[in-house]
Image (cartoon, rainbow, N blue to C red):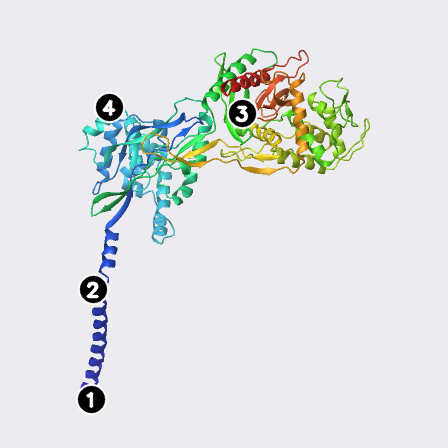
Amino acid sequence: MNNKLINKRFIFIASIFLIFLIIISIKLFNMQLFDTKKSMASLNKLSTKIVYGESKPRGRILDTNGNILVDNIGINKIVYKKENGIKKEYEFKIAYMLAEKLSLDEDKITDEILKKFWIANNKDLADKKITAKEYELYKQRKLKASKLEELKIKRVTKKEISSYNTLDKKAAYIYYLMHNGYSYDDKIIKEEITDEELFYVEENKGKLNGVSVVTTWKRVYPYGDLLKGILGSVSTSSNGIPKDKKTYYLKKGYSLNDRVGLSYLELEYEDELKGTKDKYEVKNGVKKLIKKGHRGNDIVLSIDINLQKEVEEILKEEILKAKSEANTNYYDHSSVIITDPRTGNILSVASKQVIMQNNDYKVNDYITSTLSLSISPGSVVKGASMLVGYKTGNLKFGDVYYDKCIKFKNTPKKCSWSNSLGSLNDITALKFSSNSYQFQLALKVAGVKYYYNMPVKIDSSALDTYRNVFKSLGLGSKTGIDLPNENAGYEGKESNAGLLLNYAIGQYDSYTIYQLASYINTIINDGDRLKLSLLKEIRSYTNDDSIGPVKLKYEKKSIDKLDLDKSYFLRVKEGFKSVMQGYLGRGYMGDIKDSAGKTGTSETFYDSDADKVVDTETYTKSFIGYAPADNPVMSIVSISPHVRVKNNYSNYSSNVNKRIVSRICNKFFEIYK
């Protein structure tokens, strides 16, 4: 019975085994007969690797006439790619060989780099800097390997790295560069090498395993510093992607050492300007090009570099001249922007700053300040204030107010610039820039029946009413300009009767020069606020230096619309025309007779002793204008902050702002006859 039982069990087990054998045989037969292609594809995939070549040059940046503002030139750089089987000791030897011959930026050699080099050279001593408890936590996976490395670096003492001489430090830096980044990337040791450095590497290839010279590119600027401030900058291969943008760029398929736009236009148009890399398939050690890369697309700006040159030269000359005039102690810069009001395109933007250096004045480019600085513009906003009156029904065409000082209880009088302006309507109030007219209108908007020396308290809704209209016109709103980090200006937080009156004459909130350009263009376009842009078009890349076909042409974009009757805008524009025919505006736009505009002066304050507290009263001059008056092809804004210091012995005020605008307008219409 026992034998029979054993036989039955044996037969059962054998049957199970036979069934499994049959199933496996069928699977193998099916795989060999039917899945050969699939299996071979999987095998090829396992033995095939995709790699990418060097970054291709970025696209160029051109002006509206095709003049190249930013280009690329080829340069040589030294790179390192670790070969299989290379030991750490041999890498030390390579680092010291290169350290003897390469000139390096020694300011980049940090204590952390030296400590890492010490750890690499003193493994046993470095390991002893970790406690048994910390090693136990590491084994239990409660402490990461990277944390152990951090602890080692932290515990390397200054004394332990103090013995390093200049050569040791350079070798440490090179060794750091040889291991910085992903293992599969070429490590950049030095860019823009000299001929001597190139010859040294080429002559010692047999000793410098993994070290080679490759050709890359760098940005060049044919027009020098013209407009360079907002053209932007590009990272180097050694710096690659900024640390704070690492995640963003890696998700988009970049490598750590890829060069990217860091600021302004280079950053704004990164997706178009970046080139694509050669794509290679590495199979069984053989590298094959499967997709050729190309340089980036070209960006064509609306800027005219010939006009830009003239604007910057005029600014430089007039700023230096102004510093020889009285009361310009704290005046240090002027800014100008010229736009095409029909599209919102910027034709020129510039700012120059004058500083004292070695007992002489030096003029620096200050164009980046146009994005970061905002000013109280003064009376140029009075066109917007008139529109508030028309919109709310508190002002009718031809309404007359007598120009008089406004006095509230326990506060100083608030007056116009002259005490003899008399009776004014809405047109002449703009022509003579009456503050009183705007004060009386603002009180009417606020529902206040004014009488002399009255106590007054107004609701903040009146200021909100003004701000809503101003923002629709572009004052206090971002312009959408294609530059990163646009400043939205400054909005005051308090509200009272005095501040409302100040707001109505442009002496409370502050705005950037771009917002003032947007404002004047919106009035020109009867309430249609257009996006400001430096872009004219994008051109597709070519394989040579020619300009490719148009990929994208900039079309004007409306970003807001102030819903007002067109007649209100026509009325304000009539007032702006009268300004240029009167005392205040005459000659501002040079020899151009058919023009319109508005002057502005605001009371401002200056920190004279750099203690971050404003302590000196000054005056800032501004101007907005356009020509021809009825069919404008250009608009201009100019600002000159702190152009006059307020004092008791002289009322002299430099007319530098007027000279700047006048000369630029003459030059503009000379170029565009």
From the viewer's perspective, is 157 left or right of 95?
Answer: right
| Number of disc labels | 4
Which circle, 4 or 2, is nearer the viewer? 2
Which circle, 1 or 4, is nearer the viewer? 4
Residue on which the image places disc 1: 1
Task: Choose the circle earlier in sequence order: 2 or 3.
Answer: 2
* Amino acid found under the numbered disc labelled 1: Met
Residue on which the image places disc 4: 196
Task: Choose the circle earlier in sequence order: 4 or 3.
Answer: 4
Number of other residues with Cα within 10 Å of mark 3, as a class: few under 14, some 14 to 19, many 20 or more: many
Q: Residue furthest bottom?
A: 1
Asked if the residue under mark 4 is in contact with the one under mark 1, i.e. CB atoms within 8 Å, the reply is no
The answer to whether residue 164 of the structure is visible from this angle is no
Residue on which the image places disc 3: 338
The picture quadrant where one finds residue 239 is: top left
Residue 647: image location, x then y, percent:
66, 15
The answer to whether residue 268 of the structure is visible from this angle is yes
Number of other residues with Cα within 10 Å of mark 4, as a class: few under 14, some 14 to 19, many 20 or more: few
Residue 102: image location, x then y, percent:
27, 26
Q: Secondary structure at mark 2?
A: helix
